[in-house]
Amino acid sequence: MPDVTTEASPHPLYVPLRAEPSPAPVAAPGPEPIRVPTPAPAARPAPAPAARPAPGPAPRLAPERLRTGIVGGAGALGLLWGVQARPSARLDAFFATGAHLTGLLAGYGVLVLLLLMARVPAVEHGVGADRLARWHALGGRYVLGLIGAHALLALCGYAVHTRTDLVTATGDLLSYGALAAATAGTALFVAVGVTSARAVRSRVGHETWRAIHLGALLAAALGFVHQLAGPDLAGGLLTRWLWSMAHATVAVLLLWYRLVVPVRAALRHELRVVEVRDEGPGVVSVLVRGRGVARLCAEPGQFFRWRFLRRGLWATALPFSLSAPVRDDTLRITVKALGDHTRRIRRLRPGTRVLAAGPFGALTAHRRTRRKVLLLAGGVGITPLRALFETLPGGPGDVTLLYRASDEAGLVLRAELEAIARGRQAALHFLLGPSDGAFDPLAPRALRDLVPELAAHDVYLCGPPGMARAATDSLIRAGVPASRIHSEDFDHG
């Protein structure tokens, strides 16, 4: 493939620079930050709409259905435990029965956690990566609690049954191979939980955290060995078969979607960097081209996990949203330098091989339920919303984009946004000013003034976590139902 430098002619994904000067920002009265009204329609056309990929989008599993399925599975396990339980007034039997229930639920919880992170397209596209991550984190706390309760109840039951102290009982139990495996697995799960705590996570390098997290797979395998030896599964052939099939299914999904599919996509599409362009202070766009990219079925608003095969970047998969629709077998991301890895992206060279896992995410047009749509972006969170701003169907006035930034230098892809707004006669407002300023442009009253009939809109929201939380609260107070606020937040670090 021929080299393409950053001095090459404009790519079709980019809107050519305007020949006419940009209208000057209009300062609002009082302390309100600068706002830029929608430019008047011009003769110059907007970017051509992206061609629709030939393959259809992947099926989507609704969050409510997934949640119902998870709860239903836990209920079925509780029923299994209830059928096998034998009422007894003996203290050791009471401890043993509780240990059986917590052990079954802990094993099931581990399977659920692995399934949530298996990157199954129907789950990722329907539920959303950020919600899956939150469920995974919350479920991890429950699983660790269940594992701890199971171990304590089993130890107490054994000590009471053998009439020994806890220290002696611990030594006796560890002499059993299945219990020693379970103990090693528990230690691995605890290490994963500790390094995932917010206070620790910020001090642990990403690669270290990832390596420890991979230990959860070994922990799950050790736990499976222990569970098959337990009385709840060892006594019934059908129960053992069902439990084994559940583990085998999750293992196959993990292997297929986290290893086989990315490798197959890399061989099929042969993605390479073709251009790196400066977009502003610390911001670059990277264009990646390959073969048959339309078969990836990437939708505006989605993201990939990118692995650039060069020193300093190949070991980490970085999640970045598409900042433009797919055209001419070309994908585009726009990246702000926020850490060591993102700073290295600026130094990518044309021809660099790229592995892209995805697409992922549910911040797409399928969430839309209303004719009018508000896109609310903060900082580099404009990237998925820029693609939606261009492609969401609607007539004049149906789509509004509010872009929050501290100053004009922080506006990314401004020329493209203004060209899109002119072409489709959409409302575009740049809300500029410091986040700690006296006037809050995202306050409920300010939002209602900017967006008539705000409560009748669907809202797509993407920005820094603090801004997203504040904006969500303001939107709800302004009358927008929480079910119509669509956001997706994932760690770009």
Image (tube, rainbow, N blue to C red):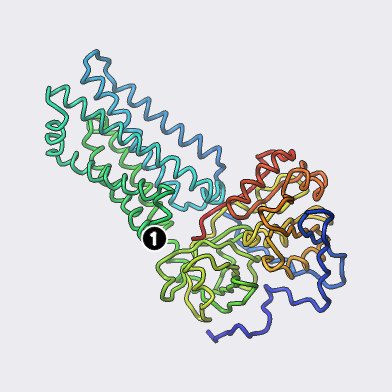
Viewer-nearest residue: 481 or 21: 21
Asked if residue 33 is positioned above or below residue 166 in the image, the reply reads below
Q: Where on the picture, by quarter, is residue 153?
A: top left
Residue tagged by mark 1? 205
**Total tally of numbered discs in the picture:** 1
Q: Residue 473 location, x and y as percent?
A: 66, 42
Q: Residue 490 location, x and y as percent?
A: 53, 54
Q: Residue at x 33, y 54 (%)?
A: 212
Residue type at mark 1? Gly
Q: Residue at x 72, y 50 (%)?
A: 440
What secondary structure is marked by label 1?
loop
Asked if residue 181 is positioned above or below residue 102 in the image, the reply reads below
Res. 7 in view: yes
Residue farthest toward the top in the current orientation of the protein: 89
Viewer-nearest residue: 206 or 358: 206
Res. 330 in view: no
Q: Where on the picture, by quarter, is residue 32?
A: bottom right
Q: Residue at x 25, y 31 (%)?
A: 152
Q: Are there few (<14), some (14-19), or many (20+) residues within 10 Å of tag 1? A: few
Q: Residue 146 location, x and y as percent?
A: 34, 34
Q: Residue 464 location, x and y as percent?
A: 59, 55
On screen, residue 78 versus residue 487, left or right, reads: left
Viewer-nearest residue: 420 or 209: 209
Q: Where on the picture, by quarter, is residue 277?
A: bottom right
